[in-house]
Image (spheres, rainbow, N blue to C red):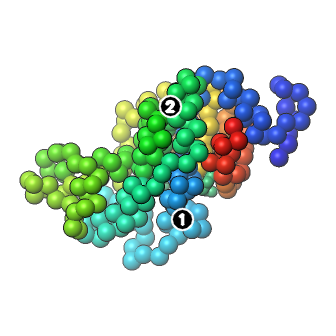
Amino acid sequence: MQRENWLYGGLMNNIDILKNWIDESDNIVFFGGAGVSTESGIPDFRSVDGLYKQKYKYPPETIVSHTFLKQKPGEFFEFYKEKMVAPAINSKPNMAHEKLAQWEKEGKLKAVITQNIDGLHQAAGSENVLELHGTVHKNYCDRCYKQYKVSDVINADGIPKCECGGTIRPDVVLYEEGLDSDVMSKAINYISNADVLIIGGTSLVVYPAAGLIRYYRGNKLVLVNLSETSQDGFADLVIHEKIGEVFSRL
Ligand code: OAD
């Protein structure tokens, strides 16, 4: 898509505008979701082939809830290990993850804020990653708080158990649970002070994460998402393409 851009004169392609903004900035912040990892082979939640569109015994939002973990841990871990841990640990970063890590190394990008729990940003080399919904890579005993690796969870037969008898649970934010306030306030701080804010691969429907967009005060808000979002109207630049493909052209 072409659009008039007075800053650079004449008609410019949206990707070229984004390229200019990135070239000129040393204060980029990225905020992303499941769509960042679909090109790595991990399904998102709400697309037609997403995790929440498949048929299970219970609605997936019910399965990944605090109450369900407490009341039906066997079924929780069956779903969690197969649908959330296995795809995460068997996938590799794609061009979107790689570019973000590169921009951080070049001193252009300040932080990656993600709703994803797959750890692929760190696998690509990003260091300052704020994981709003936690990560499959961190796990702890719900009784004695001993820390465990993801391999302790995936390799356990059924419900992963601590030596103290407690259940080893993932350090991820389940439905009915609150976000870490320290991570949230850091995210707000980065977004409020960002020059360029790129939001990618998220439907922006899950709060409070989706509300972070409101803290941005600049005039270079970029949305890179395959489908339309309810926030498209707030963006200065909207690109409805695959984020890995877009980033590989930057
Ligand atoms: P969603 O599945 O809701 O949205 C993913 C978005 O990414 C959709 O709008 C897709 O169109 C888009 N998309 C898919 N592949 C893409 C690609 N290659 N390039 C660009 N866009 C692409 O996922 P999230 O917004 O991340 O929370 O969902 C938010 C939260 O809902 C998740 O963190 C999870 C879930 O419940 C918890 O588990 C707490």
Q: Say above or below: 64 vs 206.
A: below
Which numbered disc flags the more N-terminal residue, 2 or 1? 1
Q: Which residue is mark 1?
A: 50
Residue placed furthest toward the left = 164
How many marks can you see? 2
Ligand 1 appears in which quadrant? bottom right
| SS type, badge 1 | loop
Between residues 63 and 39, which one lies in front from this camera angle? 39
Question: Does ligand 1 reach within 8 Å of label 1's beta carbon?
Answer: yes
Q: Position of residue 189 (x, y in %)?
A: 49, 27
Please, what secondary structure does the residue beneath circle 2 have?
Answer: strand
Q: Residues within 10 Å of mark 2 (few under 14, many from 20)?
A: many
In the rendered image, the vertical position of residue 67 relative to residue 239, given as above or below = below
Residue ID for mark 2: 111
| Cα distance in 3D space between marks 2 and 1 | 27 Å
Mark yes or no: residue 219 visible. Answer: no
**17 sits to left or right of 194:** right
Residue 217 left/right relative to 239? left
Residue farthest to the right?
10
| Residue type at the position of mark 2 | Ala
Q: Quadrant of the C terminus?
A: top right
Q: Amino acid at mark 1?
A: Gly
Please give left or right for residue 58 compared with residue 154 in the image. right
> Cβ of disc 2 within 8 Å of ligand 1?
no
Residue 236: percent from left, percent from top: 73, 36
For image coordinates 33% across by 48% down, the residue present is 137
On screen, residue 83 above or below 176: below
User: Which residue lies at the image location 43% right of the left edge and 70% below the top edge?
Assistant: 59
- Residue 158 visible, this orientation: yes
Give x and y (percent) for residue 86. 38, 61
The label number, if any, that marks residue 188 in the structure image:
none
